Structures are given as C-alpha cells and as structure tokens.
Amino acid sequence: MTLAMLPFMLAFLLLVAGLYAIVAKRNLIKVIVGLLILDYAANLLLVLMGYRTPPAGEAPVAPILTGGLAQADDLAASAVDPIPQALILTSIVIGLSVTALVVALAIRLYEKYGTFDTDLMRNLKG
Amino acid sequence: MQGMSPIVKNITRVVAGFIVLFGAYIVLYGHVTPGGGFTGGVILAGGLALVVLAFGEEFARKVLTHEVAKTADSMGALLFLLVAVLGFAGGVFFTNFLPTGTVGSLVSAGTIPIANLGIGIKVGAGLFGVFLALAAFRRTTAGGKKEVDVLQSDI
C-alpha cells in the first residue's frame, strides 16, 4: 500500500460510492446521480492510468509542444500520456448522452405514476 | 417556458455570438490545441441553449426549431460518413488522403479537421435537440399541477 497507489484507491472509492447509490436507493433521481458518479469514476480511473511519474524532485510534464517540432522527441519521452485524455473527452460526452436518455425515462415514469419511488412503481398498475 | 427580462435578452444578443464563435474555434483547431469535435459541440449546444432560455419557447418554435436540430444532426453524420467513404480515393476505407502539412498549423493533418467539423455539428445539434425535447416544450404531469419535490427526503 504505497503512496503512489493512493489516487487509484480513491477512484475505486468513488466507483463503489456510485455503485452503492444505484443498488441501495429507492428514489429514482438518486439512482441517476449514482449512475453519474459511477461513470465519472471510471473516466477518472482511465485518465489516471496515463500518468508518468517524473524523476525525483521535478514537476510532471504536460504534453504541450511549446518549443516547436525540435522539442518533440524528448517531450514524447518525458510527458504525461495524452492519448487517454483525448479518448476520455469522448467518453465524458457519451456519458452525458446516456444521462439524457435516463433522465428522459425518469420524466416519463413520473408522468405515468406520479411518484419517483421505485417501490410504489412496482405495486401500481398502469 | 417564457423568456427572461430585457436585461438578459440584451446581454444574450451580445454574448451568444461570441459563445458560438468560441465553440467553432475549439472545433476547428482540434488537431492543434486540446478540444476537437466533442467539446466544441458541447460549447455550441450551450450557446444555443442560452439563446432559447433567454428568448423563450416562441423562439424555439419559430427560428431554432426541433426540425432544424434534427436536420443539422443528420448533416453532421453524413459529413463524417462522406469523409470516411472518400478515403477509398487513397486505397482503403477511411484513409487520410489529403496532404498532411507541418505540425501546428491550421491547414494540416489531412482529413482530421473535416471529421472534427462533422462531429462538432452533430454533437452540438444533438445536445441542443435533447435540451429542446426535455426542457423547452411544455408537458402535462400526472395528477395535475403538483409541485415536484425531486429529492424527497424520506426515501
């Protein structure tokens, strides 16, 4: 349990919190918030994978070319990996679309049953 | 959903053009700076949602209608498909057949800026259509005009 594993453990903690909200809550809006937290925890974990620890005493290097093309090779050897960051941008927008779909379903369920409580939704007849 | 006060409307007239311009900048410079189609499309959708919120439902029914959002959505998807099918001119499906210039300039990286443009249009129009369908058009709720307490604290 070194200190380098601490960000990963905290991302897992967020993931477990989101999963608990999906499984154990009765209010539909709380389930949707749990789904959001789970999605963002997975994205955070994947971005954390791309980190490259710098040599001792230096700051981590951002993958931005400030010195032109001549700097590209040693930037590629020392910078944080930019590919997970670019792909997780896509994944965040996909999570937004999934949230929109789920919220539309919740609105429709509220119009049909008049409540957000999932226990009551099982007992009422349409 | 009616519009907001004249202060909000006047400020929106000034600001909304800059928001759309910023979104277009993020989309078109996606191969040079961080960003690209997805984030630029989200900024575009935010700017359009600001205009509909400030000017009310009548604006959403007359000028920026749901049909416009759906048409722009399909046009973005067709542009992306066109870029992919035109890759046959280079040999295989989705080849980068345009010349790749110098790293860091605007006209470079082949077909990637055109694909970014298609994605930006699609994401912007799609998220704006989602906003219209969920929030802008009035709907009847079950059981009449009841106030919705979403986070009911006993469950």
Image (cartoon, coloured by chain):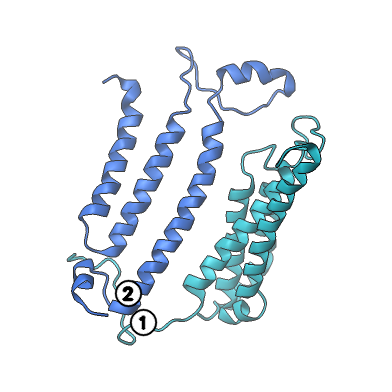
Chain colours: A blue, B cyan
B41 left or right of A54? right
The quarter holding residue B67 reads bottom right
Image location (x, y in percent) of residue A36:
37, 52
B62 left or right of A116? right
Image location (x, y in percent) of residue B93:
71, 41
Q: Is residue A14 above or below residue B20?
A: above
Which residue occupies the foreground of this view, B148 or A29? A29
Of the residues shown, which amino acid type is indicated by label 2?
Tyr
Of the residues shown, which amino acid type is indicated by label 1?
Thr
Q: Which residue is mark 1?
A: B141
Which residue occupies the foreground of this view, A4 or B120? B120
Q: How crowded is the residue under tag 2: few (<14 C-alpha within 10 Å), some, or many (20+)? A: some
Image location (x, y in percent) of residue A6:
32, 27
The quarter holding residue A90 reads top right
Chain under callout 2:
A
Task: Residue at 43%, 41% (x, y): give it.
Answer: A43
Task: Residue at 59%, 27% (x, y): give it.
Answer: A63
Farthest-out residue, top: A56
Q: Which mark is residue A32?
A: none
Task: Residue at 74%, 32% (x, y): give it.
Answer: B104
> Does residue B15 appear in this view?
no
Give the Cα distance between marks 1 and 2.
8 Å
Which residue occupies the foreground of this view, B48 or B133? B133
Q: Is residue B5 above or below residue B125?
A: below
Image location (x, y in percent) of residue A40:
40, 45
Farthest-out residue, bottom: B144
Q: Secondary structure at mark 2?
A: helix
The quarter holding residue A30 reads bottom left
Q: Which mark is residue A110?
A: 2
B111 left or right of A62? right
Q: Secondary structure at mark 1?
A: loop
Q: Is residue A59 above or below residue A21?
A: above
